[in-house]
Amino acid sequence: MTTDLGRRIAARRTAAGMSREELGERCGADARYIASLEDHVALPTVGTLARLAEALGTTVGALAGTRADPGPARPGRPPHTEARPVVLGEEECRRLLGVRGIGRVAVFTADGPAVLPVNYLVVDDGVAFRTAAGTVLAGAAGTEAAFEAERIDEVAAKGWSVLAVGVLAAASRPDVLEGLAEAAHATPWAGGERTHWMTLAPDRLTGRRVEYRP
């Protein structure tokens, strides 16, 4: 049973072009909780409602139905400021990667470069993701690859990007596979049997953030 609150959250999220996973990441909630709010009767706390409103570019009152919705916020930079790229240190790059979500893996194939999206998680000093045996990514084991993750906030006109470059490896040790399976918090968006774990320990880790300064 969908509530008015659930319909308003879903409508705002769809208008913003966000998935449930993306909205969950922005407000510190699991995608399953977002689904529960949208599709079932649920009573979020005031704090959760405030974080949802901020992530969706609206107000608590608009989501709760107590005042008119101001409509989607328009993208744009803060007044009297200039956009400047900021180079991120390794520690900050690792922290941002820890947000998890969706990243892209770039590999070389016989037909040229290929860039593929993956659900990923951070393990030790690297990243790990699932694919299926016989795929392009599985076949790239032992070769150099690049992994990129980013977050773009079009409303605030800001964002960051982190790039990790290293050698792809297929995880095979039973204890490692068990740990990866336990750490995974979402099923791959591509669906299907994707139980082939790949890891990338970066030899180079770089990142940039766009900030606005006077």
Image (cartoon, grey):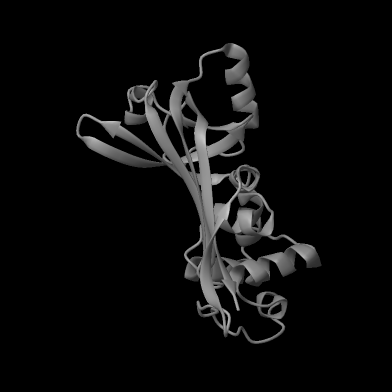
Among the 4 quarters of the image, the one containing residue 142: top left
Q: Is residue 160 left or right of residue 175?
A: left
Q: Whole-percent x and y of residue 24? A: 62, 55
> Which quarter of the picture shows residue 124?
top right
Tell me if residue 20 can be seen: no
Q: Quarter holding the C terminus?
A: bottom right
Q: Residue 164 appears at what percent x and percent y?
A: 49, 39
Which of 91 and 14 lies nearest the eye of the viewer?
Answer: 91
Farthest residue, direction left: 111
Q: Residue at x 44, y 26 (%)?
A: 167
Residue that extends furthest to the right in the rendered view of this protein: 46
Apparent side of residue 206 relative to residue 42 in the rendered image (left or right): left
Q: Is residue 3 above or below residue 133?
A: below
Q: How many marks?
A: 0
Residue 175 in the image: x percent, y percent? 63, 14
Q: In this rendering, does residue 106 appear at all?
A: yes
Asked if residue 31 lies left or right of residue 131, the reply is right
* Residue at 50% from the left image edge and 69% from the top image edge: 154
| Lateral position of residue 24 relative to residue 210, left or right | right
**Residue at screen point 71% across, 80% down:** 61
